[in-house]
Amino acid sequence: MDTSESTTGTDSEPAAAPEPRRGWRRFAMDTRPLRIPAYRRLWSSTIVTAVGSQLTAVAVPKQIYDITGSSAWVGAAGLAGLVPLIVFALWGGAVADSVDRRKLLLVTNSGIAVTSVLFWLQAVSGLDSVAVLMVLLAMQQAFWGLNAPARNASIARLVPESQLPAANALGSTVMQTGQVVGPLLAGVLIPVIGLPELYLIDALALCVTVWAVYRLPALPPLASAVKRRAGVREIAEGFRYISAHKVLLLSFLADIVAMVFGMPRALFPQLAAETYGSYGEGLALGLLFAAIPIGAVAGGLFSGTFSRAKRHGWMVIGAVVAWGAAIAGFGLSGSLWLGVFFLALAGVADMVSMVFRGAILLSAATDEMRGRMQGVFTVVVAGGPRLADVLHGSAGSAFGARQAVTGGGVLVVVVMLCLAFAVPALRRYRV
């Protein structure tokens, strides 16, 4: 299949002018990308994995804690998954730029499905081995690291550039919904059917994903791309590309600033016990963890309000500043419900930031570099919140939880504004 078959056809004929949206439809989610069959298949596979992956994300730490009775082992498991994710995401980005991305998605989705089957087998056999669980978790995250850059980089080949924000909003909304629904569903199912069956549900769901990816068109490197290997030199070339394109560099820095300085989830248990304990520690903790994803989902459902914006750089800057301000407001809140409100606002801002950072990465980079850009993006998204856990945990112990949260939010606003005005590339960027 030639390259023209792996696009929406917009390269060969002019795109039709979008129909004007009137009334409430101006604010509702922009679903135009779903009219494209190839993107619709990719998106529908994301619906399945968004929930299924969260079932395993809950089941693994639960099983490790059941075996060891130690939260330290649960934390060690997180590290066991993070290292291969970082390594294979960087390498996977280079691979995605050198092979047919559809074939890479088939291989990696199949690998993730096989890993889920192995999770089920070890659970149903009663093996109770933390070492086996960590090895399987490392395998799963390695496959995911290879998968994510190819999946994200493929979007720009499936939808027109003008619809990239809408496509990112659709994908991000599904993933955030999975982060809310998946853990709740796992909490309901574990007492009823047990951990082994939870792994099995995820494995079966992944079979649907493999079928959806199989139905995608071929996505080989473009004819203009230089044939290359996927080694260390190609990975380094990706970092040089980022450093030479300031708008890309600033889009990564914006996420690092927002997440490292402004993600206070490590302090949620302390805040639930000390600040919001009168509401019930369990209720407070659940609401704090759920508030940001719920806000992000709400932002996605009303993404029609922003997904057609042209000044993508200013949208990222505004979203990160709004995130920091909302986190500072959360830190100043003595009321649980006011705190949840501010966290939900932060979730909306995070959705806007994700949508336009993703659009910038797909539109500002050439196709032969998109895989490597998405590999770095995966590392930043995975690593930023974990660095934030260390920073906020230390600051909370030293200065108090609310002071650490408020200071982090203010720092996000100050640093982001300084970056925006010191380096004009991001604020000048538009489609």
Image: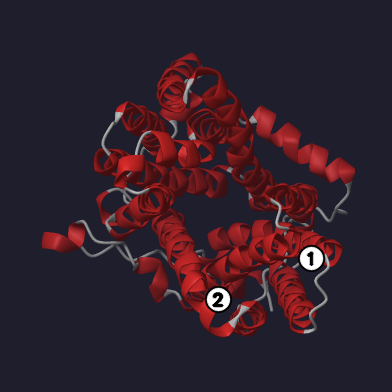
Quadrant the C terminus occupies: top left
Picture coordinates of residue 347, whole percent (x, y): 38, 46
Q: Is the residue marked by circle 1 packed among few (<14), some (14-19), or many (20+) residues within 10 Å?
A: many
Checking the image for residue 295, the label placed there is none
Between the residue at mark 1 and the residue at mark 2, the CA separation in whole angstroms equals 18 Å
Q: Which mark is residue 133?
A: 1
N-term-proximal mark, 1 vs 2: 1
Query: Does residue 96 appear in the picture of this structure?
Result: yes
**Residue 137 coordinates in the image, percent (x, y):** 76, 62
Residue in the foreground of this view, choosing between 350 and 105: 350
- In the rendered structure, which amino acid carries the disc numbered 2? Ile
Label 2 packing within 10 angstroms: few (<14), some (14-19), many (20+): some
Which residue is depicted at the point 80% across and 43% down?
Answer: 235
Q: Which of 396/79 is in front?
A: 396
Judged left or right of residue 200, residue 225 is right
The residue nearer to you, when weighing 178 against 353, is 178
In this rendering, which labeled residue sits more in front, label 1 or label 2? 2
Residue 304's x, y, as percent? 27, 56
Is 368 located above or below residue 146 in the figure?
above
**Which of the 4 quarters of the picture holds residue 224?**
bottom right
Asked if residue 191 is positioned above or below residue 242 in the image, the reply reads below
The residue sitting at 79% across, 78% down in the picture is: 122
Secondary element type, mark 1: helix
| Quadrant placement of the N terminus | bottom right
Residue 430 makes an appearance in the image:
no
Q: Could you say where residue 119 lies in the image, as x and y percent from the top left?
A: 75, 75
Residue drawn at 40 percent across, 64 percent down: 14
Mark 2 highlights which residue?
A: 190
Q: Does residue 244 sit above or below 169 in this rendering?
A: above
